[in-house]
Image (cartoon, rainbow, N blue to C red):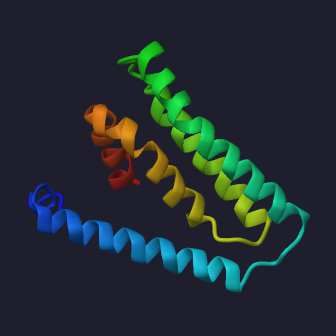
């Protein structure tokens, strides 16, 4: 939808939003149904909540203070956060994809203003 340009139209935005909500609901439901409730799960929930609260500000700070570096530290920072949260989710026997959905949701506002970062992340994700 993005490559064809349909995501720029109202219908495309509605379809993408519906897919996102459906996928997020599925991951949340499966996470709750198959969760192994233990202290590590509480730590994962707490770490995710803190990360989601701080991530938009930290990402914006990276983009302002470390702009246009060849090493792309802002991309590495986001992938590090995803790796840590995903690893903690896996250790807690939860869904590792859940933090990726939530991080994408809270960082979307920063990505709207910084289209270059979106293109860089898209190219890295496509290459891997």
In this view, the residue in front, 73 or 92, is 92
Residue 104 rendering spot, x and y as whole percentages: 45, 51
Nearer to the camera, 31 or 122: 31
Tally of numbered discs:
0
Q: Would residue 104 be found to the left or right of residue 7 on screen?
A: right
Q: Quadrant of residue 81?
A: top right
Say above or below: 65 vs 26.
above
37 left or right of 121 in image? right
Give the residue at x 20% y 62%: 13
Q: Residue furthest toward the top?
A: 65
User: In the image, what residue occupies the spot 55% across and 34% down?
Assistant: 77
**x, y percent for residue 102:** 53, 56
11 to the left or right of 38:
left
The single residue placed furthest to the bottom in the displayed view is: 33
Residue 96 image position (x, y, % from top left): 63, 65
- Residue appearing at x 59%, y 74% in the figure: 28
Residue at point 12%, 55% (across, down): 8
Q: Quadrant of the C terminus?
A: bottom left
Question: Hey, which residue is sitting farthest right in the picture?
Answer: 39
Is residue 79 depicted above or below 27 in this figure?
above
Q: Which residue is nearer to you in this view: 91 or 8?
A: 8
Quarter of the image with the N terminus is: bottom left
Residue 41 sits above or below residue 104 on the image = below
**Rendered position, 127 above or below 73:** below
**Quarter assignment of residue 109:** top left
Q: Nearer the viewer, residue 125 or 48?
A: 48
In which quadrant of the rendered view does residue 41 lie?
Answer: bottom right
């Amino acid at each position: 939808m993005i490559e064809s340009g349909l995501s720029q139209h109202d219908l495309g935005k509605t379809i993408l939003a519906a897919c996102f909500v459906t996928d997020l609901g599925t991951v949340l439901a499966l996470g709750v149904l198959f969760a192994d409730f233990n202290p590590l799960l509480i730590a994962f929930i707490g770490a995710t909540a803190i990360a989601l609260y701080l991530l938009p500000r930290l990402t914006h700070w990276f983009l302002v203070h470390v702009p246009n570096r060849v090493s792309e530290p802002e991309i590495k920072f986001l992938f590090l956060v995803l790796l840590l949260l995903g690893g903690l989710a896996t250790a807690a026997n939860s869904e590792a994809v859940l933090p990726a959905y939530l991080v994408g949701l809270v960082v979307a506002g920063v990505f709207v203003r910084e289209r270059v970062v979106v293109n860089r992340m898209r190219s890295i994700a496509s290459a891997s």
